[in-house]
Image: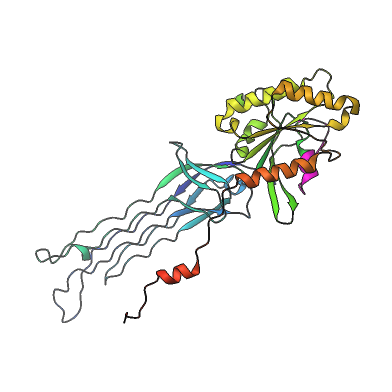
Amino acid sequence: MKFFDEAKIEVIAGDGGNGSASFRREKFIPFGGPDGGDGGRGGSIWAVADRNLNTLIDFRYTRVFRADSGGNGRGADCYGRGGEDRELHMPVGTTIADLETGEVIADLDHDGARALIAKGGRGGLGNLHFKSSTNRAPRQTTPGEAGERRELKLELKVLADVGLLGMPNAGKSTFIRAISAARPKVADYPFTTLAPNLGVVRVDDSRSFVVADIPGLIEGAADGAGLGHQFLRHLQRTRLLLHLVDLAPFDPDADPLRDARAIIEELRRYDDELYQKPRWLVLNKIDLIPEDERAARIKAFVDAFGATRAFSISALTRTGCDGLCYAIMDHVDATRPPPEPEPDIRDLDASEPSDENPA
């Protein structure tokens, strides 16, 4: 299935029903008075985060979503039926913005999150509400309100703890295959990865983190070159970025240091908040460097690049991958927000009012 992380939709909430102008007419009951009921409310449209979805393909071809309108009021104090609400299920991590203003309406950042994206109109009032001592036969009613109508932009930002950065063929897909059960495509040509891949890395029975791999970046990505700029949004929720560098490129004219600096510049131009995230340097493919030259080349690159924290690995042979994973796990544990404490049942019992009278 093709990966869709953007969609534009139109949502139309239901209109409220009209109020009714009616009078009670029964035998032996003269001047029965008004009995027109209210119109029912229109149905609203809700967005619901669903962890069983991972793409916005459901909104790629169906663009307009409507909710039911409310029924009109009737005589004999009959109120109109309320319109049924409609739920749109979206992947966890979807942000919903107004297409016209750009205002973010909702951010579905956890499973089960709900957000009202189009509110149904209120039902109109029947003439029952307008009777008074001076107006015993009112014929006034109010029409139902129109439901909200909005054009929205949906963007999916995958939820991951760690994001992988790098030029095409830096070894990102090989790395995520080495440390997780994810199986992205790996080949000896650039732009093998065409869509984000997620992998769960389990360092022991109770500790794990999620890694996101996006298509490789090239110079000029912030201006639209290549594929990677389309998926940089998926790194905005991560806690740590791993900058993978091919230390032994096949092209003799390639300059790993220049390419690494170009990636950082593209990050800065794309989003300053993403640029400011913690970023570790990971020098890959050290198995292709002779052992007697390896330490010197790694040190020279780190000194020239100025990385605050650097690791050297071989994703193909898994050399250095375990130590890197444990370091990542420690960082993720340190930066994760503490879980919300569960309420103490004894405190809840104590706060409830007692039916017994004090002696």
Answer with left or right where residue 246 lies relative to residue 73. right
Residue 317 lies, in percent from the top left, at 86, 39
How many numbered discs, if any?
Answer: 0
Q: Does the magenta segment cover residue 94? A: no
Q: Quadrant of residue 34?
A: bottom left
Residue 126 lies, in percent from the top left, at 25, 62
Q: Main secondary structure of the magenta part?
A: loop
Q: Residue furthest top?
A: 253
Q: Quadrant of residue 100?
A: top left
Magenta region, residue range: 174-190
Q: Residue furthest left?
A: 134
Seen in the picture, residue 258 relative to 322 is either above or below; the reply is above
Depth order, front residue of 22/256:
256
Q: Does the magenta segment cover residue 176? A: yes
Quarter the C terminus occupies:
bottom left
Depth order, front residue of 236/319:
319
Residue 229 lies, in percent from the top left, at 63, 31
How was this image coloured?
rainbow
Seen in the picture, residue 287 relative to 109 is either above or below; the reply is above
Answer with left or right where residue 176 lies relative to residue 82. right
Depth order, front residue of 69/93:
93
Q: Quadrant of residue 173?
A: top right
Answer with left or right where residue 236 lies relative to residue 84. right
Q: Residue at x 56, y 46 (%)?
A: 94
Q: Residue at x 42, y 57 (%)?
A: 43
Q: Is residue 230 visible?
A: yes
Q: Is residue 183 visible?
A: no
Residue 207 lies, in percent from the top left, at 70, 52
Answer with left or right where residue 154 lies relative to residue 260. left
